[in-house]
Image (tube, rainbow, N blue to C red):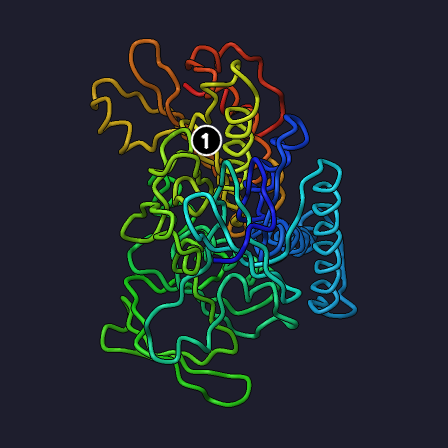
């Protein structure tokens, strides 16, 4: 075994949002000697191939929508040149590189030692790091956090390697002419919307009748109808059998779907797999430390982020629980507080209930709490009351009926007190809107609390405080 080259109070494996938040809190606020190891670019999935570049791309697609909608307001906008995707992509890359630099400077500011390299366990308190410069470090740590995140899955289908994943989406230099996305989760749905509004012919292949199937049925049904209205091709009850290379730029997808049960083909210049993610644990050698995992490889951790091995912790996507960046950040900060913040934080942990989430589809989707089926299952039909509305937002009032996207809201209340146990919103501005209403739901808001707030008029959000 290699001699110990470094020792620390806290070793964080994974330089994504959760790991870095935990490392910085441990060192910068509580003074723990902390080392962070990251094998890729600092910031992890969110900053490099997730939330941040996704939102920038969503912004571009939203601008394209606005330019189209401007005619209804009397604007006559003539396009002198097509959207320059390549220029946009390079500017987006520059922005992400700036963020990488900011993350590294923040580690320096909080006195976290940063090691660029790939880590693996030697024992329950020793880790070896293969550094990017070819060297090695062997670290003994009093506490170790695994926050390595996850990576996209590729199916076992002949020719699947011709497709890309969400990671590859951000490497595209030009906009595809015809793209197929396979998947029904938020990644495939968001990217389908972006491709479509930026100008690609877009096909979305799903295994069932709807997508976003973990969301409330109102959300599922409304967003599927809206995507079809916009012109996105939805292939229901689909499966893919193989992909064949056609020429240097094009491939042929062989598939079955509801309309073609005997099989069909589609020529594409881009295929994106959005079929889920797996934990980034393959070469961590968790067995050397005795850390238990689920059948899918996720590290098993309790509400306090403890694994089954004392002084080894895990959080974020590697645990497979509420895979959202802000959740990992919040859990990381609470863990650092508990480990190093003294007796006042001895019970610190993240409350995983009522965490709001948003899908940057077109239009946006927001959700917090229980879906209607979940609420009825948990509390019984007699103890649930549903308030819902759908309408056309005023922004679209001047547009032809066939061009007006939907807005739909649902508030799920429980018991005589009508405590709000679920809120589901779809429409323009839903992401910003839900952050505020999420605070109310987290505080235990009742329907009468919503009713007691004077509406802001004219807004879409006022519908949430005027429902009957």
Question: Which residue matches tag 1?
Answer: 355
Image vertical order of residue 237 relative to residue 62, above or below: below
Task: List x then y, in percent, for residue 214.
Answer: 35, 43
State the quadrant of the C terminus.
top left
Mark 1 lies on a secondary structure that is loop
Give the total of numbered labels: 1
311 to the left or right of 258 = right
Q: Outermost residue, bottom direction?
A: 247
Residue 389 in view in this figure: no
265 is higher (above) or lower (below) than 58:
below
Which residue appears farthest toward the right when viewing the image? 80
* Residue 333 image point, x, y percent: 56, 30
- Report if residue 184 is visible in the image: yes
Q: Position of residue 82 (x, y in %)?
A: 72, 69
- Residue 229 relative to residue 371: left or right: right
Residue at (45% x, 52% y) in the render: 121
Left or right of 404 on screen, residue 419: left
- Image check: 9 left or right of 157? right
- Tell me what residue is drawn at x 61 percent, y 61 percent: 131
Dot 1 surroundings within 10 Å: few (below 14), some, or many (20 or more)? some
Q: Position of residue 411 (x, y in %)?
A: 40, 25
Q: Nearer the viewer, residue 411 or 434?
A: 434
Given residues 115 and 264, the one toward you in this image is 115
- Quarter of the view holding residue 248: bottom right
Which is nearer the eye, 377 or 96? 96
């Amino acid at each position: 075994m290699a001699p110990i080259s470094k020792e620390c109070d806290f070793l964080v494996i994974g330089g994504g949002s959760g790991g870095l938040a935990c490392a910085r809190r441990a060192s910068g606020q509580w003074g723990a000697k902390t080392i962070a190891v990251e094998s890729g670019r600092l910031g992890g999935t969110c900053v490099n191939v997730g939330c941040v570049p996704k939102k920038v791309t969503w912004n571009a697609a939203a601008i394209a929508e606005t330019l189209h909608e401007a005619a209804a307001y009397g604007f006559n906008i003539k396009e002198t040149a097509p959207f320059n995707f390549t220029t946009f992509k390079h500017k987006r890359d520059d922005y992400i590189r700036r963020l990488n630099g900011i993350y590294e400077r923040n580690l320096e500011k909080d006195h976290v030692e940063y090691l660029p390299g790939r880590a693996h366990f030697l024992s329950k308190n020793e880790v070896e790091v293969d550094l990017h410069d070819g060297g090695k470090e062997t670290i003994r740590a009093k506490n170790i956090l695994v926050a390595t995140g996850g990576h996209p899955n590729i199916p076992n289908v002949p020719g699947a390697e011709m497709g890309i994943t969400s990671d590859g989406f951000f490497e595209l230099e030009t906009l595809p002419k015809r793209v197929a996305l396979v998947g029904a989760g938020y990644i495939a749905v968001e990217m389908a919307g972006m491709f479509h509004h930026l100008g690609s012919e877009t096909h979305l292949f799903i295994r069932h009748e709807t997508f976003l199937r973990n969301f409330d049925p109102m959300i599922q049904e409304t967003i599927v109808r809206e995507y079809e209205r916009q012109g996105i091709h939805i292939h229901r009850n689909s499966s893919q059998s193989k992909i064949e290379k056609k020429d240097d730029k094009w491939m042929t997808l062989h598939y079955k779907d509801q309309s073609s049960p005997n099989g069909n083909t589609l020529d594409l210049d881009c295929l994106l797999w959005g079929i889920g993610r797996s934990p980034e644990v393959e070469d961590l050698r968790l067995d050397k430390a005795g850390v238990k995992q689920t059948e899918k490889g996720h590290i098993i951790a309790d509400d306090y982020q403890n694994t089954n091995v004392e002084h080894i912790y895990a959080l974020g996507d590697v645990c497979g629980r509420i895979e959202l960046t802000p959740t990992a950040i919040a859990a990381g900060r609470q863990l650092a507080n508990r480990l190093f913040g003294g007796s006042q934080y001895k019970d610190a942990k993240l409350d995983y209930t009522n965490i709001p989430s948003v899908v940057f589809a077109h239009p946006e989707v927001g959700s917090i709490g229980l879906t209607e089926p979940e609420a009825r299952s948990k509390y019984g039909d007699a103890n649930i009351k549903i308030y819902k509305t759908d309408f056309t937002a005023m922004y679209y009032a001047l547009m032809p009926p066939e061009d007006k996207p939907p807005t739909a809201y649902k508030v799920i209340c429980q018991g005589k007190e009508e405590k709000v146990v679920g809120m589901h919103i779809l429409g323009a501005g839903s992401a910003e809107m839900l952050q505020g209403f999420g605070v109310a739901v987290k505080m235990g808001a009742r329907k009468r609390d919503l009713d007691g707030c004077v509406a802001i008029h004219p807004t879409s959000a006022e519908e949430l405080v005027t429902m009957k």
